[in-house]
Amino acid sequence: MKRWQMRRNCALTPKQLLQFYIVLVCLSLTVAIGFLLAGVWVIPIFTTLELLAVTTGFLIYSRHALDCETIEIEGKRLMVKKFIGYKETVYEFNTQWAKIELPIEGSKTFHISQSNLRVELGQFVRHEQQIALLAQVRVCLG
């Protein structure tokens, strides 16, 4: 079985992001409570707005941190798996009938197609990596 996986380039895993988020929330709340005890009631309001904005951004980031695309070839079966935003979609092709369409000029993605099924791939890899990947996959097609 041959397998190629293309992943999003994320600096932090969801676990690391959660740890950073907890530290950030604790620090922000400590500062806000300190100002509240000193009689400055405006700071906790802005801290709440800040934490709402940061929470929203972190949720969006963590939702897509694990996004990936996988191509698997086993015998005459070519499987394409797309995991985007916690939703996995699986496409199955026959290696003898599947065609790889090179990325057109200015496009960031390429396509694998067979009859009326066409799947867009390659959004997580650079153009140079796509060319090498496509060459490796083409060798395995019939």
Image (cartoon, rainbow, N blue to C red):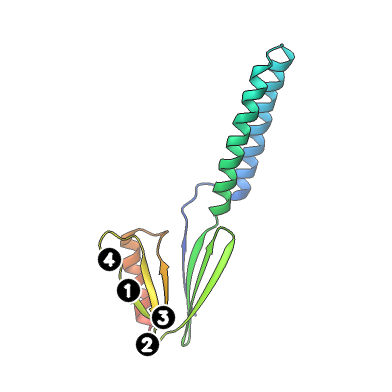
Of labels 3 and 2, the one closer to you:
3
Mark 1 and mark 3 lie on one chain; the one further toward the N terminus is 1
| Structural distance between the alpha carbons of marks 1 and 2 | 15 Å
> Under tag 2, what secondary structure?
loop
Residue 25, compared with residue 131, is above or below; it is above
The tag on residue 142 is 2
Q: Badge 3 is on which residue?
A: 116
Tag 1–tag 4 contact (CB < 8 Å): no
- CB contact under 8 Å: marks 3 and 2: no
Task: Give the labeled residue for mark 1.
Answer: 101
Task: Tell me how far mark 3 sits from mark 2, CA to CA.
Answer: 19 Å
Residue under pointer 4: 104
Question: Percent from the top left, x then y, of residue 14?
Answer: 60, 49
Q: What element carries label 3?
A: loop
Q: Do the residues labelled 2 and 4 touch (CB within 8 Å)?
A: no
Is any part of residue 65 visible from this angle?
no
The image quadrant that residue 19 belongs to is: top right
